[in-house]
Image: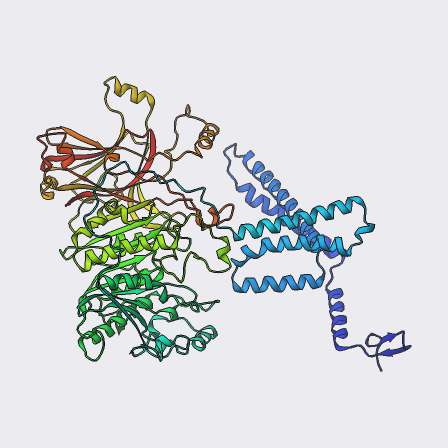
Amino acid sequence: MTGPNLLRYDPTTMNTTTPSRWSRIKEWLRKAERALEAGPRVRAGIGVAAACLTLLTAFAIGGALRLGISPYLDPIVGILFFLVLFAIFVLLTVVSVRLVLVLAGLFSWRAFLVLAGLLGVVMLAGPPYLIIIVPFFLVFTLLGAAVGGLVRGGFGEASTVKKVVLVTLAGFAVAALVILVFRMASLGSDDHLVALSPDPVDVESLAVDDPSQPGAYPVLTLTYGSGTDKHRTEFGSDAMLHTEPVDATPFVKGNEGWKMKLREWYWGFNFESFPVNGRVWYPDADGPFPLVLLVHGNHSMEEHSDPGYAWLGKLMASRGFILVSVDENFFNGSWGSQLSAENDGRGWMLLRHLDVWRNWNEGADNPFAGKVDMERIALIGHSRGGEAAAIAASFNRLAVYPDDGTIEIGGGFAIRSVIAIAPSDGQYNPASRPTPLDDVNYLVIQGGHDSDVSSFMGARQWRRLRFTNGQDYFKASVWSYRSNHGQFNTVWGDDDWGWPFSLLLNRRPLLTGDEQRRFGGVVISAFLEATLNDHVTYRNFFRDLRTGADWLPADYYITRYEDSGFSILANFEEDVDLMTATDGDTHLEGTNLAVWREEHQSFRKDGSKRNGVVVLGWRNDEDDEENEEDGDTDSSARYTVTLNEESTASLRLDIETVLVFSIADTGDSPPVEDENEDSDADKEEEEADDENEEPEPVDLTVEVEIADGTTASIPLSAVRRLAPPLESRFSKMPTEGWAWGRAWEPALQTVEIPLSLFSNQIPEFDPASITAIALVFDRTPEGMVIVDDIGFAER
């Protein structure tokens, strides 16, 4: 017998029909909902239980507060404070729920399903896509509501108030859409840029040619590959030289599952047969020539990165180098198929390319037989490739893989130099330690408007590099204010984030692509000339980039330089005693300072450069300056490094020696301790008045004292203008501190002061009798700086 709930009456036919399966499912769901629906008594019971829990929590948490009022009043005040906060959160919850219900009422169930599907796809692609979608979602919702009301809502019969509301809403939505589209399409703003002012210090230019200009050699090019690439014939059937694939499985462990199967389907090979592919630019001459391997970093694997360095390959080949752009696109990913913990594999792959080049050089029947100088090798890497280049140079000294001693590394190559362009750091840590690097020349390049690697990660590896074997090496870093991440590669360009995030990028402050590559060509070519061809004059360029200012595009450049002849007094890495130095015979002392501490230099947001520095802050009173003018004792803040006779004698200082230290303006002010100091409101007013003024560079006096107590001093500005805080704006969003932290990140500048400058003040000045060095903060009323690596070097 058929029950009444299983029949449906059709009035058009006067018959009953059996309901569909879907109707029966809906009816079952309604019954389940009614069965689970709480009655009024159940809801009341839940409410009483929630209230009891609230009171118990108030007594447990609020009653435990100790406010220092009295032992009896503290718990009462704490409980009341908890209940007030509870009431505020309840009110906010009620308002939020009401708002959600109002917004939900705007959507039909069909619209809700469409939007839910859209958000689901966006979340699958990546939560950051919400930054793009949400503004358009809100604008289109308003526009749809307005148009619906105008077209289908009986506009003609509507009241005047409703007409005004709908027209206003439509106008607002259209205006918002226009503004949003214009904002997304615009290049952004450069209002934050610190204007580049002329350097007051006259520096003599180097008497050598611009290293970014082509040399005399005709350039040839070819490709080599393993023949397994499905997408590029230049590494397959069109490759001039064939290579055998290699098994990279030990270096990509943990990368498993269906996404890896998709990668294998796309590329046509798996981890056991990674191809050895490369693009080569080389001189049309006999050689032998130095060998340079260059590897890209992480990028969309479908948009191949290796052709993007053709500009550098042609330049270096014309100047007598063999340059290879190594293909490691198969280490990259796309749409969630990114490899993880693979940077050791990227470095290991460079050594496998060196295997191939050694065989070609020693063999016959190939274009490079006898033409490669395997004693002069450099590795260059960009982004993750920059870290990979350091990993390869570190692996090169090892017999076995640090994470698995059963796997031989196969190195032993004469790698003289490593160049890292905007590198990552710490994505691979051999044996759970930071990558060590010894006895190579090292150059790191970083852009101040790099919105991918937005902090100077490469400063870590620069600090870790050690010179231990007594041979001649140097390391340098170059920071360019208006350079970004991608324009060193013509494929990547000015799009550091990829579509559609690039719509949010602030591109207006950037150097043009040609300018940035000119900067890259200058420093990379000069470094390779200095380290592979032993061209000493180009080495002097890294001591002071102003000697090659005519080669470079106009920009702020901040540089560091250190060589194996540097004698360190204090690098602030040794202990927690502020008065001891790296050289155990040296004493440190701060006088009249508002801030004196040692710490690891921090990034603009999270983490640190793992580089010990001393932080010095000062605030000079006008009364102190008047007292000094009247002949009273100098009360200026100072930081003094005192040497004893043994340390001075061991340094062997002479008139050719230079005093060296690194320094940066933090952009901060020392804390105010005097109650009579200006109020916060006064300071905010002063800051508002100064917003449109260019910041004045911090200046100070550098003073040396000799054994008889005589002193000589020069202003820092006489040898080097200290850069002010250089603010970066990566995006077009109204605020970006939540993503990048501070608007600037101090970059240390190496300062070299020839001791001969002090001898001009004291005719009998003997560098070997120096007993103290002082930084005297008497030229800028207040400020804070970080200082590192105080010592001497021979030039």
Residue 787, position as x, y percentages in the image: 27, 41
The foreground one among 548 and 665 is: 548
Residue 785, position as x, y percentages in the image: 31, 38
For the N terminus, which image quadrant? bottom right
For the C terminus, which image quadrant? top left
- State the image quarter where residue 713 is shown: top left
In the rendered view, tell whether residue 513 sits above or below residue 370: above
Residue 655, position as x, y percentages in the image: 11, 39
97 horizontally vs 386: left or right: right
In the rendered view, tell whether residue 624 sits above or below residue 25: above
Residue at image point 65% right, 64% down: 114
The foreground one among 161 and 10 is: 161
Asked whether residue 361 is in view, the answer is yes
Asked whether residue 427 is in view, the answer is no
Residue 474, position as x, y percentages in the image: 20, 53
Residue at image point 44% right, 69% down: 302
As drawn, which residue projects farthest toward the right?
14
Residue at image point 34% right, 44% down: 746
- State the image quarter where residue 638 is shown: top left
Residue at image point 69% right, 50% down: 170
The foreground one among 522 and 646 is: 522
User: Number of marks in the image?
Assistant: 0
- State the image quarter where residue 426 is shown: bottom left
97 horizontally vs 716: left or right: right
As drawn, which residue projects farthest toward the top?
630
In the rendered view, tell whether residue 318 sits above or below residue 788: below
Coloring scheme of the render? Answer: rainbow
